Image (spheres, coloured by chain):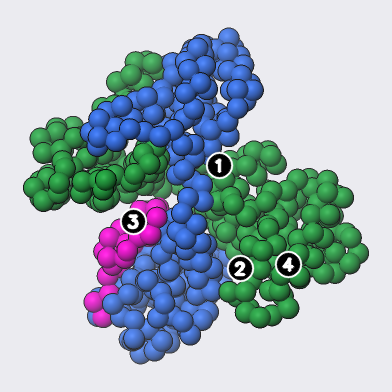
Chain colours: A blue, B green
Amino acid sequence: MANPARTLFILSDHTGITLEHLVKTLISQFDDMCCERMVLPFLDSPEKIEAALREIDAAAREDDAPPVVFSSIVDDVLRSRLQQADAEVFDIFDTFLPRLSAAIGVPSSGHVGLSHGIGDPNHYDRRVDAVNFALNFDDGSRLRGLDEADLILIGVSRSGKTPTCLYLAMQYAVRAANFPLTEDDFLHGRLPDALHAHRERLFGLTIAPDRLHRIREERRPGSGYASLAQCRTEVSAAEDLFRDKTIPFLDSTAVSIEELAIEIMQRVGVERYY
Amino acid sequence: MANPARTLFILSDHTGITLEHLVKTLISQFDDMCCERMVLPFLDSPEKIEAALREIDAAAREDDAPPVVFSSIVDDVLRSRLQQADAEVFDIFDTFLPRLSAAIGVPSSGHVGLSHGIGDPNHYDRRVDAVNFALNFDDGSRLRGLDEADLILIGVSRSGKTPTCLYLAMQYAVRAANFPLTEDDFLHGRLPDALHAHRERLFGLTIAPDRLHRIREERRPGSGYASLAQCRTEVSAAEDLFRDKTIPFLDSTAVSIEELAIEIMQRVGVERYY
């Protein structure tokens, strides 16, 4: 049976990013995706709340089923207005703050948008610096300054190194460099010279040859570089090298950037700044 | 008065990213940061749960105040074991799912880690493709294919274009290119030729001249490029150009990448894929 048409609203006085992720997690627990999602960020005035309420009421009239509203709006007045919406309202602060406040014995303050704003400018600058670092030290493009890396990802071309480095930088201010492994390294069964001094910060990425083949085919269709035989040879040689040099490694084939990042930080023991 | 030493645990059977953000949002509502935070991801077996419980019990003994535990663990058996921890336990599924399930009339399923895994492979690949797009179309480095961009950020060098494009790509699979504005553009008071065909997808970034000066000084200390006078001239010319060509723009000075991304998507009306 098809689900009734229903709209799920995500209301925030700021970016709404946190709430979007939370709702995604909660919704993932239902086999049938329940609703059309609608994110309304930056609702920080009575006028904007009224406009949001009009959208909610329109959905209540037009959909088959009543809207569901998640809110991370902080201001008390705006929040209480929201409770009058013709919808089931989940307010994350109402849900958690009273019990959390009691548990830690500290009253809450009512600040808006602290978690995805600039926050501590030093922390924020560190993230932007880390992104620049990842860009500068992408694909072995620079050797001088490599000792400033928190970690160095190595692997064959297109095994997922760059997006993972950028994610680590963007989200956790981790300075992650990456370095390709090439024919020459495999031929001699050794690490690139530039990496010898950084053994304890190396982490390998590998990937299923057929997946690598498909990725490389999109980039250079029909090339030797993209051939399945070449992909098999490189992946196998890279994994041999990781094992031989006891470099920890992960298979990126069926794993998201987020999963890779969290697992790599945990295994290398990188300090997160956030 | 100093807060008592207390540990806040974030337990997840997967990356824990969503829960970390939620906790950060909740904690931001308390003026005094309450606790040392400890993230324990990938707790997906009874053994790992027992190890986590030992850490929680140790904190309960050693800290001045009882631990606070947030959990997004899905498995019922692991969750019920966790309830026996010597701590105040906040379980986000217990908190939301019963009421949400009732509201939408669908039973929940008990799937682990769907929100930061690969999920729909097409969506995931689209994100990785978008990151590659942002890297290929960074800083005006490529013109051919620019018509595939969902949006094009323009602004003076170091105004925040690159990290914003990467964030849009990584999180929302938005194909964002960026293009620098240069002396030559300002001299003629016009947009770079390559951008004329893409007027409706342009978005400007500006920045306070003194902030730009500090950023450029770190990159090229003492250069004309970094001088405050040069920064003032460029910023003023860029803003004149945005106004003259009616290109929407934002000031990145005190605004995070996340805030820029959300506001830009909203204003340009870019479709998010996620």
Give the magenta part as a residue range.
A245-274
- Subunit ID for the residue under disc 1: B
Tag shown at residue B273: 1
Question: Which residue shows up at 55% across the image and 12% down it?
Answer: A60
Q: Are marks 2 and 4 on the same chain?
A: yes
When the figure is inspected, residue B7 is found, relative to residue A10, above or below; the finding is: below
Relative side of A82 to A242, left or right? right
Residue type at mark 2 is Ile
Q: Residues within 10 Å of mark 1 (few under 14, many from 20)?
A: few
Measure the C-alpha gap from mark 3 to mark 4: 39 Å
Q: Earlier in the sequence, mark 2 or mark 1?
A: 2
Report x, y in % for residue A124.
Answer: 49, 57
Q: Which residue is mark 3?
A: A262
Tag shown at residue B215: 2
Residue type at mark 3 is Ile
| Residue positioned most to the front | B1
Quadrant where the N terminus of chain A sits is: top left
Q: Which residue is mark 4?
A: B231
Report if the CB atoms under discs 3 and 1 are less than 8 Å apart.
Answer: no
On the question of residue A220 being in view, the answer is: yes
